Image: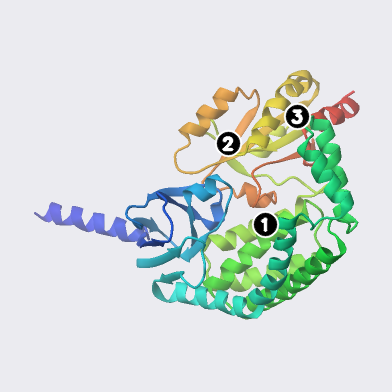
């Protein structure tokens, strides 16, 4: 009897020490027929955590979590079409009830579940009251011009028309490059649409200033989430260029404040990794070492793989992102031609939960180089390499880990190897 009681106590202690809590989400879908919702962690998007069936316009799903984080609900059929209309919420112990209209109209939308979600909704109500109506006035006008085919300048519209009738890759790339040039010169829109876009941009800048002010003055899980999102967005828009030191210093100061209040929260680690990326990952910067598992499940550090190679390409890729998979295939003949001349490739991908399917995918693609799997983002590789909102990227480094160039295609890699590995 005594042994039995001790076993029960041990189970209870282990259960409590795990720190897991249960969140139940349930609700109704208004005004549309659909059979499933996808559940995402905001910090792991676009990898979904679960598919939640919808029956008779309602859903009910329970899952465990350790710390309150923002999750997203997205209609499965819309996600498959690339329509990302999300219903965000913070995980909290107990039940969260939703009412989700077909078009995510805020008038019919509601989330009822504890103080944290109330605070989250209050923030977005303030944001909407201050900026939404102003923005929509110009958005409606621009959308009307899109529908009538009058939004673009004559030069940009000509490239749009040409793209519709062009299939050859190099010709399409030339047209896309011309579009980028026109956009950079402010010649994408016609004069009337350009004024509307400039008004929108002005409001967006005011909104960002207001958001940053909110983050600077508020220490809460809501402001921490907004802070993490802003830093990830900044990493994405920096396009691997050196970031102003004043921005890095300000980010570090805010991180210290949030880390003091929420020392073990995963968002703090994401920001910490992003700061490391800002400081290092750009042309002329330095590779960041990390440890992840290889396809055999052994822990391996990145530096140990590139040791002894003159040049190494770090190829970040995702199974769900076709361009990054294609880059991997295109790199195989390049690797075989130059692997005995001092060239190495390291494939780096993410894996969540079980990684058997990912290992099978790597074996099927027959990648002849080492592959590392950042399982459950424990190494934080994506944040460290400023890839938070991207599904792939390439970085060419020398034997010392210095970053020579970023975002290379297989053809560009070969072009570099021809001149650098003579």
Q: Position of residue 170 (x, y in %)?
A: 83, 32
Query: Where residue 319 is drawn, which disc sits there?
Result: 2
Q: Position of residue 13 (x, y in %)?
A: 28, 59
Residue 122 makes an appearance in the image: yes
Q: Residues within 10 Å of mark 3 (few under 14, many from 20)?
A: some
Q: Determine the CA span between mark 1 and mark 3.
A: 28 Å
Q: Determine the CA span between mark 1 and mark 2.
A: 23 Å
Which callout, 3 or 2, points at the residue further toward the start of the chain?
3
* Residue 150 figure quarter: bottom right
Residue found 52% across the figure and 61% down from its top: 103
Q: Is residue 42 above or below residue 393?
A: below
Which callout, 1 or 2, points at the residue further toward the start of the chain?
1
Q: Secondary structure at mark 1?
A: helix
Q: Which mark lies nearer to you, 1 or 2?
A: 2
Q: Secondary structure at mark 3?
A: loop
Q: Which residue is mark 3?
A: 308
User: How many numbered circles does the render carry?
Assistant: 3
* Residue 341 figure quarter: top right
Q: Which residue is mark 1?
A: 274
Q: Position of residue 276 (x, y in %)?
A: 70, 56
Q: Determine the CA span between mark 3 and mark 2.
A: 29 Å
Residue 400 makes an appearance in the image: no
Q: Is residue 47 above or below residue 363?
A: below
């Amino acid at each position: 009897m005594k042994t039995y009681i001790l076993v029960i106590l041990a189970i209870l202690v282990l259960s409590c020490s795990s720190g897991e809590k249960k969140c139940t989400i349930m609700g109704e879908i208004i005004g549309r027929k659909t059979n499933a919702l996808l559940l995402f962690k905001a910090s792991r998007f676009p990898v979904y955590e679960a598919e939640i069936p919808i029956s008779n316009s309602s859903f009910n799903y329970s899952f465990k979590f350790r710390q309150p984080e923002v999750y997203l609900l997205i209609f499965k059929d819309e996600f498959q079409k690339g329509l990302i209309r999300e219903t965000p919420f913070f995980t909290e112990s107990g039940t969260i009830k939703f009412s989700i209209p077909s078009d995510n109209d805020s008038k019919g939308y509601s989330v009822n579940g504890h103080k944290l979600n109330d605070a989250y909704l209050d923030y977005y109500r303030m944001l909407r009251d201050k900026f939404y109506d102003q923005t929509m006035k110009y958005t409606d006008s621009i959308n009307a011009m899109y529908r009538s085919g009058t939004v673009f300048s004559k030069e940009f519209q000509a490239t749009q028309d040409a793209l519709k009738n062009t299939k050859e890759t190099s010709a399409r790339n030339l047209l896309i490059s011309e579009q980028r040039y026109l956009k950079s010169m402010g010649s994408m829109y016609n004069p009337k649409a350009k004024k509307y876009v400039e008004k929108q941009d002005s409001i967006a800048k005011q909104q960002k200033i207001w958001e940053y002010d909110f983050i600077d003055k508020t220490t809460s899980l809501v402001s921490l989430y907004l802070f993490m999102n802003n830093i990830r967005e900044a990493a994405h828009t920096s396009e691997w260029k050196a970031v102003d030191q004043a921005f890095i210093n300000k980010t570090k100061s805010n991180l210290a404040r949030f880390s003091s209040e929420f020392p073990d929260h995963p968002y703090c680690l994401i920001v910490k990794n992003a700061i490391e990326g800002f400081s290092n990952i750009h042309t002329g910067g330095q590779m960041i070492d990390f440890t992840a598992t290889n396809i055999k499940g052994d822990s391996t550090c990145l530096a140990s793989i590139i040791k002894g190679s003159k040049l190494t390409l770090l190829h970040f890729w995702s199974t769900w992102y076709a361009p990054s998979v294609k880059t991997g295939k295109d790199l195989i003949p390049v690797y075989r031609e130059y692997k005995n001349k001092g060239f190495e490739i390291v494939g780096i991908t993410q894996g969540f939960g079980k990684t058997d399917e990912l290992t099978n995918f790597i074996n099927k693609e027959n990648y002849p180089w080492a592959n590392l799997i950042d399982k459950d983002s424990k190494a934080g590789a994506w944040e460290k390499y400023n890839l938070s909102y991207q599904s792939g990227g390439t970085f060419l480094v020398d034997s010392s880990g210095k970053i020579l160039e970023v975002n290379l295609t297989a053809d560009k890699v070969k072009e570099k190897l021809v001149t650098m590995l003579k």
